[in-house]
Amino acid sequence: MANWKVGADRNLPVRDATWDGGEAQASIWAWAGFNGDSPEPDKAKRCFLVYDTDDPEKKGSYKLPFARIEDGKPTAIGNGVRNCAARLSQTDIPKSVQEDAQKVIDHYMEKLNPKSWISGYQTKAGMSFIKAVNDRTVTGLSSVMGNVDDGGDRIWPGAYGKTLAENSQRIKHLWMHDAMSPPIATIQDIKEVGRGQLPQEMLARCPEAMGALEVTRTYLPNERADEVYQGIKAGAIDEMSIGYDPVKFDFENVEGKGAVRNLREIRLWDTSDVNWGMNAATMNLSKSLSLYRGMSDDVLISNFDALMHEFKEGRVLSKQNLTLLRDAVSALQKLIDAAEPPEEETPKALTERLNRRMRMMQREIDLFLVR
């Protein structure tokens, strides 16, 4: 019987790069002497999350590679770590070993991206349904539970239970998640509803749905709120989104879906009417992304929202497009990191907003790369 233990080296240099598990393992076997008569398990175990201590000289005794050999030295690769995060729960090793391996994953993800990883403020839009419109009060369904959305997430029933019990009075209803502007409506009621309360139209589009978030809100008597309300009445605005922090989550591989993040607990900050959210449409981003290379700082900042919107609409990215996207994200992060400490509220709020959007964009890239 195998005796699985974590042997991963937590002090390897780490960088983001494309990942091929087979090529990575081949480089490890060659470096650690496993292709000859003198294998060195102490070398090999550094590059895998777990290994069998009872038979360490066999290649089959190593699972979950996350590093490869570069210039004669092992290097942890971001996409290798993300791949391990997606596969860990499905790996046949003891639960206690899985927990120890998860600590290694968390360690490297923090080194890769300490400001975002896969936590912090995020937004999620998807299938929505307007149930009722009456005298400036609208009841709608959003945030479908149980299905895998186009962002690679699955929200589970009960995920909103704690936040609604403890924080419902602080949740705001916004337009396009614009936290810099006042709310456009007051939330009268917000709750999880089960599958039995979903309309047939929703179930037909999403047969695996287990429930949704139901939001009843009354629109304020001002110009912007009225514009949104009239758009809802006319059917021009029919989607909602949520702004949230993921609190408890895990990963799994789902056939036909790839790496999926299971959201078990969510801290909800806002609900929002939106023009559109994540969808299954695909588009060629070459032209739009190429505009960001060499762009001046002020133009880059002013166009970042548009870049983010276009990325959310499409999931077909070539390596060139992904490089361009990373360039834009990196340039913005450097601007934020280099900014002088703001003395006034407006620059401070802008900096915080940009940082929040940076986390959202980086998280989208992370999940795309896991697939």
Image (spheres, rainbow, N blue to C red):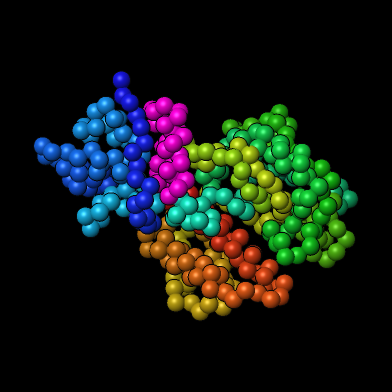
Question: Residue at point 68% right, 30% down?
Answer: 195
Tell me where the magenta segment starts and ends, as one range. Answer: 81-108
**Residue at 83%, 66% in the rendered image:** 223
Q: Residue at x 24, y 28 (%)?
A: 55
Task: Please tell me in which quadrant of the rendered image residue 224 appears.
Answer: bottom right
The image position of residue 61, as x and y in percent, is: 27, 31
Rendered location of residue 263, percent (x, y): 58, 40
- The dominant secondary structure in magenta is helix
Position of 268 with respect to 113 (left or right) is: right
Q: Is residue 99 one of those drawn in magenta?
A: yes
x then y, percent, for residue 341? 62, 74
Residue in the foreground of this view, choosing between 155 and 267: 267
In the picture as drawn, the residue positioned furthest to the left comes out as 37
Residue in front for this viewpoint, 97 or 17: 97
Q: Is residue 203 visible?
A: no
- Front one among 58 and 195: 58
Number of numbered tags placed on the structure image: 0
Coordinates of residue 270 in the picture (x, y in percent): 72, 52
Whether 31 is drawn above or below 53: the answer is: below
Vertical relation: 99 (above or below) 331: above
The correct choice, above or below, for 165 with respect to 1 in the image is below
Residue drawn at (64%, 65%) of the image = 352
Above or below: residue 264 compared with residue 113: above
Is residue 317 something that shows in the picture? yes
Q: In what quadrant of the picture does the N terminus appear?
A: top left
Find residue 230 and report its image quarter. bottom right
Magenta-span inclusion, residue 4: no
Determine the residue located farthest toward the top in the rendered image: 1
Task: In this rendered view, identify the residue nearer to me: 7 or 172.
Answer: 7
The quadrant where residue 264 appears:
top right
